[in-house]
Image: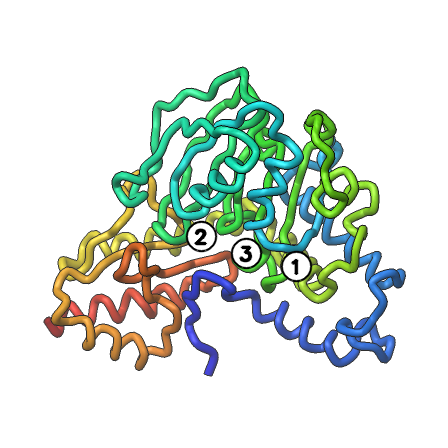
Amino acid sequence: MKKHNFSAGPCILPQEVFEKASQSILDFNNDGLSILEISHRSKAFVDVMENARALALELLGLEGKGYKALFLQGGASTQFLMVALNLLEKRAAYLNTGTWSDKAIKEAKIYDDILEVGSSKEANYNYIPKGYSIPEDHDYFHCTSNNTIFGTQIKEFPNSPIPMVCDMSSDIFSRELDFSKFSLIYAGAQKNMGPAGTTLVVVKEDILGKVSRKIPSMMDYSVHISKGSMYNTPPVFAVYVSMLTLQWLKSLGGIAAIEKENKKKAQLIYSEIDLNPLFKGFAAEGDRSIMNATFTLENENLKDTFETMVKDANINGINGHRSVGGYRASMYNAMPLESVGVLVDVMSELERKA
């Protein structure tokens, strides 16, 4: 039986994507070859790469607006360094809202001092800082849209006077935004897009080529753009599954359609967290993520009972990160409302038993 998979990542993907990807491992395009063994230079895979890149721009509403989409390797963690290499000339501004933004700051500091315009570190990142100012004389402003570990999400993005860079690894394609406000977006695939192994980068070309340093070829966005994201052997299978997931999302009606479903799931679980006296939400109410609901059990004596009930309900992956403790329900795009309902039923049943 398929489990209700609330894992934070690698995570749930659509069933039809699993089925198509599984078939492609045996025989891709009825060519008698597996997707795992075809040449990355073959027309069949070049078509996959071009389709995946085009779909990303289409779904984000960035077609014809000077952006390029890339599928790279090294995860979002490599982008912490790559952003700084390509964009940081004098000084950059960062908003510190969690573990991953803190790590991004650490990597950027290799090249220069970094201004933290706001931070919620003192409160273990349970809220999103507000009222900060972005200086006009800095090279770029970096933020993290959704904080997987802590369950917080930026609801309103600033009108940045300088190029805005955003790590959207855990909520890319989940909600409608004016994506043209961002000069560079990056996201590891393993939340809403595909398996671990590739990272989507969407960059506005006119922000590149302005640093004085020499950039190693593998770390240079312009090099990857010039080679159509094929400068080196790409992660073929990860890109292919990402393409399938983007096709699935488009068939549903795109980001607008999936956002409605994501809001239903978030409302269902947060209502239970707020109404059930046995549980308490971790993130500040106004900053709660629609992707990752973090919560704790108020009575630790019920921990074993609750976790046994969760296991019996065929629920997987709700243990919270060690930085927060408690529990975390990750409800990415492919998570059905039904699965969230199963978890909520378990939480309600625990209250009746207590």
The label on residue 303 is: none
Q: CA distance from mark 3 to mark 2?
A: 12 Å
Percent across and percent down for residue 252 are 60, 55
In the depicted view, which residue is nearer to us: 99 or 213?
A: 213
The residue labelled by disc 2 is: 262
Which residue type does callout 1 highlight?
Answer: Ser
Residue 49 shown left or right of residue 42 in the figure: left
Q: Nearer the viewer, residue 100 or 287?
A: 100
Q: Is residue 255 left or right of residue 43?
A: left
Closer to the chain start, of discs 3 and 2, is: 3
Asked if residue 2 shows in the view, the reply is yes
Where in the figure is residue 151, as x and y percent of width and height? 36, 50
Question: What is the x, y in percent for residue 32?
Answer: 85, 80
- Give the label, 3 or 2, closer to the camera: 3
Give amino acid for label 3.
Asn
Q: Nearer the viewer, mark 2 or mark 1?
A: 1
Instruction: Describe the element under mark 2 as helix, strand or loop.
Output: helix
Q: Vertical placement of 51 versus 244: above or below?
A: above
Q: Is residue 110 left or right of residue 294?
A: right
Residue receiving disc 1? 242
Which residue bears the numbered disc 3?
192
User: Disc 3, disc 2: CB below 8 Å?
Assistant: no
